Image (spheres, coloured by chain):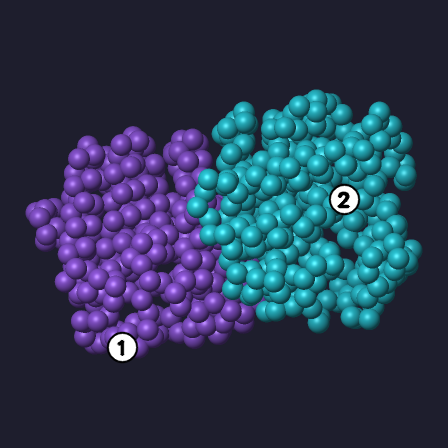
Chain colours: A cyan, B purple
Amino acid sequence: MQRGIHVTTSMGIHTYLHNCRNRVETALRTVFPSDWLIPDKLREAMDYSLLAGGKRIRPILVLAAAEAVTGEEETSEKALDFACAVEMIHTYSLVHDDLPAMDNDDYRRGRPTNHKVFGDAMAILAGDGLLTHAFHIVTQAAKTGVPAARVLAVIEELSRFAGLTGMVGGQVDDMLGEQGITSLEQLERIHLHKTSDLIAFSLRAGGHAAEADERQLEALGLFGRNVGLAFQIQDDILDLTGSADKLGKPVKSDERQEKVTYPFLLGLDESRRRVSQLTKEAGDALLQAGLASPQRLLEIADYLINRDH
Amino acid sequence: MQRGIHVTTSMGIHTYLHNCRNRVETALRTVFPSDWLIPDKLREAMDYSLLAGGKRIRPILVLAAAEAVTGEEETSEKALDFACAVEMIHTYSLVHDDLPAMDNDDYRRGRPTNHKVFGDAMAILAGDGLLTHAFHIVTQAAKTGVPAARVLAVIEELSRFAGLTGMVGGQVDDMLGEQGITSLEQLERIHLHKTSDLIAFSLRAGGHAAEADERQLEALGLFGRNVGLAFQIQDDILDLTGSADKLGKPVKSDERQEKVTYPFLLGLDESRRRVSQLTKEAGDALLQAGLASPQRLLEIADYLINRDH
């Protein structure tokens, strides 16, 4: 990473990300089997949000984590079901979040949100369907050579990281705390659960696909947690300092909405220092875990955190 | 059953149901581990709907199915996690169904619905939490002696029967068809997916806990499907012919709401004939599957279908 760790791999990071993204896009197009009798409108509503593009950061991290463990690109094939599942979970959370009863957002990635197109009831059901079907997709990994005990571990972790003590819990904390966040601990807890938990899960899921040992899984989880948090802080920083052009959204929107952010609580310099520290810890954990090839994950973290958009 | 099959067992059906219900109630009180850091308000909202009583038909069927396979009451202990999971799924579907964007119901079982007490956003998240955590509870069965492959099978089936081609799909069909159901096939498809699928799942899940063979699983699933459908038709019949006193709700509410029902499409006599036929088929399937002790399941079906309330 720019801050401390020097990284070199043969394929450029942009090519690598592009290739992974293509594999994920292709796989996502077949998560709803064509011979299943799914109501057309439901299929359409789910596809609308699931195939809306985006960076696909979480599923890419699943694939990259699997590859990091063995050093073989083929290993990531076994992780493809987990990659799709995590993107389905991420997508359902956005669809439900955007509902009028929640954040009431009309646009996402420049397109009308799911409920604006399909109505609130269908958006609720499309979210429920994506969430339920994500678990189905995880089970399919057992048919591509991932041992049953590993698939079960991934299901247990997914239900935890995406559930009551993870993403759903984080959403509730965020909602209840909207007016009253006063401490860094509070803000960090919300970010950890709302965002980092699913990223930590992604890394661990890739590890399970590659049959990583406990030490490797822990390092991958810590890496995901820290990178997720650093990414979030960087987001807050960019909102204050970035250019509207590069961000694709108005800058200082957090300030205008009186959102409590890291720079608001810590100041810009200390926020930047915190990004560095989290990134360094993430890298150190990874390099000490005995992974066959941790470089690519370090590159992705670098790409995510040291971005200007 | 009253129609055709004569049933005798030592413990009365009411005592049996009472005992099962108590076991389920006790188990449901511990599905959210006390040492998990779940936001208080989320825990409260989930408990409000999950511990609101009710007949607990689905979880009781899970336990009874496990016992039917081996003839041993102890076997049903292994099925307790699956029983809790199915009730959590059923509860989440009610919480989301009652939302203003869906059926907009203010009361359920004589109490204000979840969103009336906790608000729409929390009701959405409580539903998401219950759904996600149901899968967690299923995984716990692996720790009580159910083989990993069986637990995986249950997860795969739960995601299907509760998902896109099951309950969620049925909800969508119901919602889209509200004004335009004209055929029996259409009505039956909605009931099958909206209601029967989760009941069929319950029976199969109990079977998996008892390590039933494929033939037994199929019979249990068919039994659940038919009993679920017969139950639904009986519900429509009672709405037309029952007394408000016994039903605990106004009679002929379907007619007033211009709901398309079995009696509306088939007439009362033909609807009653259909209940008989489905019940007989359900019993026959069960008796031919080589279960150690199918009687209790037949009794439960009899109790559910030949009720007057």
Q: Is residue B289 left or right of residue A116?
A: left
Q: Residue at x 39, y 65 (%)?
A: B180
**Front position in the image: A227 or A303:** A303
Q: Which residue is mark 2?
A: A227
Q: Amino acid at mark 1?
A: Pro
Badge 2 and badge 1 in a common chain: no
What subunit carries mark 2? A
Instruction: Indicate whether B82 appears above or below B271.
Output: above
Using the rendered view, name the quadrant where residue B88 is placed: bottom left
Q: Which mark is residue B250?
A: 1
Check disc 2: other Cα within 10 Å, few if <14, some if 14-19, many if 20+: many
Using the rendered view, name the quadrant where residue B242 is placed: bottom left
Instruction: Indicate whether B272 appears above or below A90.
Output: below
Pinpoint residue B114: horizontal percent, then vertical percent: 47, 69
Q: Residue at x 70, y 22 (%)?
A: A72
Q: Secondary structure at mark 1?
A: loop
Instruction: Indicate whether B309 appears above or below A156.
Output: below
**Front position in the image: A210 or A119:** A119
Q: Amino acid at mark 2?
A: Val
